[in-house]
Amino acid sequence: MGTTTTKTVAVTGNQAVAEALRQLNPDVMPAYPITPSTGIMESFTSFVSNGKVDTETILVESEHSAMSACIGASAAGGRVATATSAQGLALMWEMLHIASGYRLPILMALVNRALSAPLNIHGDHSDGMGMRDCGWIQLFSENAQEAYDNTIMAYRIAEHKDVRLPIAVNMDGFIISHSIESMTFIPDEEVKKFVGDYIAIDPLLDLDHPKSIGALVLPDYYMEHKRAQHEAMLNAKKIISDVSAEFAKLFGRQYDLFESYRLEDAEVVLVALNSAAGTIKDEVDRYREKGVKAGLLKPRVFRPFPYEEIGAALKNAKAVCVMDRADSYGGYGPLFMEIAPAVYPYRQGPVLFNKIYGLGGRDLMPLDVDQVISETIEVAKTGKAKMVKEYITIRN
Amino acid sequence: MKQMNWKELPHAGTILKAGNANEYNTGSWRSLKPRWVEENCIQCLFCWIYCPDSAVNIKDEKMAGFDYDHCKGCGVCAMECPGKKGNKAIVMEEEGK
């Protein structure tokens, strides 16, 4: 670690993200290390100690303080990053809204982990889904390469003048954060050129222009502020596409708002986030060989959610199974709740159903996906789902 | 004053003009009003120090009455006022009395 190369390297997801952060060289990185994101700070603080970055790390007393320090440093005019997981993110929750409300382009590496209780340190998406309404841009990553690439693109998206919102890059705890995969790094100077210098808007350290942030806003103005925040989020969709197109041109890896895998003519479609997509792709291939028109849609951008684009991509499918690695007790899975309104305008669209899988790091095996695809084929044939929401990878 | 719509708001709601709280009159919030009893005032300026707004007027380094456009009537000044020989130099009275 520490030297970049275009050669293929073998690293963990945490090392890949730490390497991206080294190349981004933020001004300030406040953090309170928590499993499974600890490895990011472990690597990054060694970069600080070895003089590989100019970053000021602040080891704070809690995640609430970590996010508060991020907000202070960002409002002062610095480029800021942090890393966290699960309970850490939950403790930041109050400050997440402050970061987005102040329109501060803070970067968070979020290594997805299940929320307690029961206490669990393994990967699911309950932490990331819990920050859905906090006003942060949310990118999801299937593997170490995608987590690295998303991190490299993050500041370009978050800092764009039409956006100016904080951004979280998600990857699966342990499955990705602690597994060694082969991937490639972009050379330092090319990252530097791609990301560019940070130009803060209204920084507090511009002492010639004193200003106040965080003033009380009563019913006469609060709603206007929130509407402006929604607009910034809508703008982010185009900026993410633009930045991703530029990234693809320079570095050869193509990203969009979501990934379509054998989706074009697919009649039987699975929708899933993050690492599960890898297993699903293998099973889709297997079914394709058997002549089944199967496909996968893997959302990369969860906020802003690309409803129109995903709706258009799914409208010709016969059956769609949305797979959630997080739950809403007494409701549907959070991804299902986004896919349903995306498909809603197409009254003759696919039959939708929802599987909750892999909570607390429970493995999703090829056989599980095989069963889901086979059920989706059945739903496509009959036009009816037996159960709209059901748990899989579970002892019944 | 015409209110801005959501497109006209400054970025992040940042207040770019320092000290413009002076333009926002909060005196109408008041239900109790401080009255200065000058003969009991020893010019300790506790009222000026404790006022959570900036509603105590000072002239030539001396207490010179209240800024009723901004005083919210919290009564902290009257509470802190030591007065003279047991008689307060600031008393709170009902607004409109």
Image (cartoon, coloured by chain):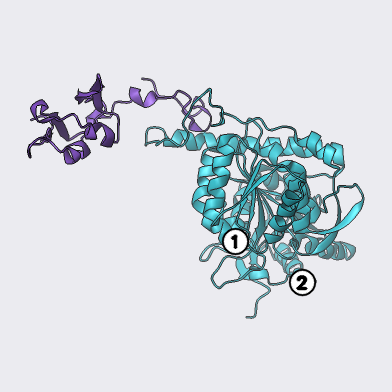
Specify the quadrant of the image occupied by residue A87.
bottom right
- Residue found 72% across the figure and 52% down from its top: A44
**Relative to residue A339, is residue A250 drawn left or right?**
right
Q: Mark 1 lies on which chain?
A: A
Q: Find residue A74 and report its horizontal and vertical position in percent.
A: 59, 39
The hue in which chain A appears in the rendered picture of the protein: cyan
Q: Find residue A126 and report its horizontal and vertical position in percent.
A: 60, 61
- Residue found 56% across the figure and 49% down from its top: A67
Task: Say which element carries label 2.
Answer: loop
Q: Mark 2 lies on which chain?
A: A
Callout 2, which amino acid?
A: Met
Few, some or many C-alpha atoms within 10 Å of disc 1 (few <14, some 14-19, many ≥20)?
many
Please name the residue that numbered disc 1 is placed on: A86
Task: Say which element carries label 1.
Answer: helix
Q: Compared to A197, does A322 lie above or below?
A: below
- Residue found 81% across the figure and 49% down from its top: A264
* Residue B63 circle label: none
Q: Which chain is purple?
A: B
Name the mark nearer the viewer: 1 or 2.
1
CA gap between label 1 and label 2 equals 24 Å
* Residue A365 circle label: 2
Specify the quadrant of the image occupied by residue A376.
bottom right
Instruction: Compare marks 1 and 2 and give the one earlier in the sequence.
Output: 1
**Relative to residue A184, is residue A93 drawn left or right?**
left
Few, some or many C-alpha atoms within 10 Å of disc 2 (few <14, some 14-19, many ≥20)?
few
Q: Find residue A45 and report its horizontal and vertical position in percent.
A: 70, 53
User: The N terminus of chain A lies in which quarter of the figure?
Assistant: bottom right
Specify the quadrant of the image occupied by residue A196.
top right
